[in-house]
Image (cartoon, rainbow, N blue to C red):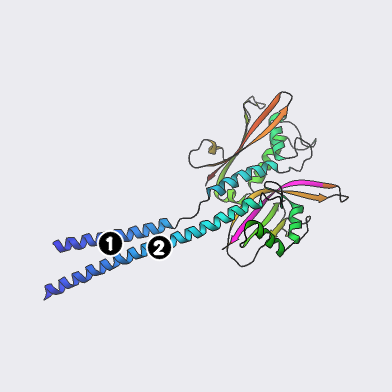
């Protein structure tokens, strides 16, 4: 009787172990699939953010030369507000994304109002608060124009800055 | 006895599966390492430093690339007449700029290096002159590094001279 009980317990134990093994294999397969899907999604977002980063640093709409932003172009582009985002979306295939350009001029970042060039050092486009995003930053130059005395007489300077481009997830 | 052995074998087998699954899931939680982005970052860092204005107006000192060039060809030149020499201004501006780049500051060691290509410039002590800002050991250190290259060209009556500018980054 005792031997039969012992054998029964043994079978129960072995069956339990086999169930654990099967469960582990199932977890393994599901985990692998989920990881692959997440990785592909994340890669898609990263690729898009990188494409947009290259686009913003090269489009003549915003730059004088590759990676050399023109503050007057940025200021004028900001005037469009929401329309600017729609316009940009039509160039790059839509989707939720944002970018901002900040000048390193030794001062704290001050957001530029639409059309503003002087007394500020940061231009932001299409930003939405409270949303998660994947973003990349890139060092760039910003060609700044400061009016001296007359509207045709300018002092210009090429400053160091950073552009941040993000895609909302 | 035989049954006990079978149990041990089954137990070890299952243990291996469990360890394997955990190891796989941990390794599968890979993060994206966009090499393309890091190369772009390094190249843009170098390019944007070279194109930055120094705040001085004379032609030898207007841009950082100008003061670098001046450091090799007219090293004692003082910017705007009474300002700093090209060499000291070049070092100051490059160090200042590199400190602004968050990714480099947080995670990378860097070496900003400028050397003449195909000719030698000697300093006052008679030793070959080159600019090395940052971690000098990176030049000879082995391992995975990101390198961005640019050239500064200077044309004079005696011909064209090239300066090779490199930014080498290595993970901390």
Q: CA distance from mark 1 to mark 2?
A: 18 Å
Residue name at image x 67 percent, y 39 percent: B91
Residue at the extreme right of the image, as rendered = A150
In the rendered image, residue B89, in percent from the top left (x then y), is placed at 71, 39
The N terminus of chain A: image quadrant: bottom left
Between A90 and A85, the one lying in front of the other is: A90
Residue name at image x 58 percent, y 53 percent: A50
The C terminus of chain A: image quadrant: bottom right
A7 displayed left or right of A147:
left
Mark 2: secondary structure: helix
A12 lies above or below B163: below
Residue bearing the label numbered 2: A31
In the rendered image, residue A140, in percent from the top left (x then y), is placed at 67, 48
Q: Label 1: few (<14), some or many (≥20) within 10 Å?
A: some
Residue bearing the label numbered 1: B14
In the rendered image, residue A105, in percent from the top left (x then y), is placed at 72, 51
Q: Are marks 1 and 2 on the same chain?
A: no
Circle 1 chain? B
Q: Label 2: few (<14), some or many (≥20) within 10 Å?
A: some
* Residue B172, label in figure: none
Q: Is residue B62 visible?
A: yes
Between A149 and A52, the one lying in front of the other is: A52
Residue at the extreme top of the image, as rendered = B158
Q: Is residue A120 visible?
A: no
Question: Would you say residue A163 sits in the magenta stretch?
Answer: yes
A147 lies above or below B161: below
The part of the chain drawn in magenta is: A155-167
């Amino acid at each position: 009787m005792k031997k039969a009980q012992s054998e029964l317990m043994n079978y129960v134990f072995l069956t339990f172990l086999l169930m654990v093994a099967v469960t582990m294999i199932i977890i393994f397969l599901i985990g692998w699939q989920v990881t692959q899907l997440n990785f592909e999604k994340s890669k898609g977002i990263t690729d898009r953010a990188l494409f947009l980063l290259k686009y913003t640093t090269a489009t003549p709409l915003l730059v004088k030369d590759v990676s050399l932003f023109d503050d007057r172009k940025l200021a004028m582009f900001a005037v469009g507000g929401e329309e600017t985002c729609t316009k940009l979306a039509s160039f790059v295939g839509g989707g939720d994304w944002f970018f901002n350009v900040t000048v390193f001029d030794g001062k704290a970042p001050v957001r530029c109002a639409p059309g503003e060039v002087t007394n500020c050092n940061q231009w932001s486009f299409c930003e939405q608060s409270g949303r998660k995003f994947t973003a990349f930053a890139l060092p760039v130059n910003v060609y700044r124009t400061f009016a001296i005395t007359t509207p045709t007489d300018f002092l210009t300077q090429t400053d160091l800055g950073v552009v941040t481009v993000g895609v909302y997830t | 006895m035989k049954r006990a052995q079978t149990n041990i074998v089954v137990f070890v087998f299952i243990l291996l599966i469990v360890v394997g699954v955990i190891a796989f899931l941990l390794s599968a939680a890979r993060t994206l390492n966009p090499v393309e982005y890091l190369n772009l970052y390094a190249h843009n860092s170098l390019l944007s430093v070279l194109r930055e204005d120094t705040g001085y107006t004379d032609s030898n000192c207007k841009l950082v690339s100008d003061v670098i060039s001046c450091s090799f060809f007219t090293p004692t030149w003082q910017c705007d007449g009474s300002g700093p020499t090209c060499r000291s201004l070049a070092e100051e501006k490059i160090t200042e700029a590199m400190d602004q780049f968050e990714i480099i500051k947080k995670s990378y060691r860097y070496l900003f290096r400028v050397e003449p290509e195909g000719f030698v410039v000697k300093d006052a002590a008679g030793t070959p002159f080159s600019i090395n800002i940052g971690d000098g050991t990176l030049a000879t250190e082995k391992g995975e590094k990101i390198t961005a290259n640019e050239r500064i060209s200077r044309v004079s009556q005696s011909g064209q001279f090239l300066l090779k500018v490199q930014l080498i980054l290595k993970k901390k």
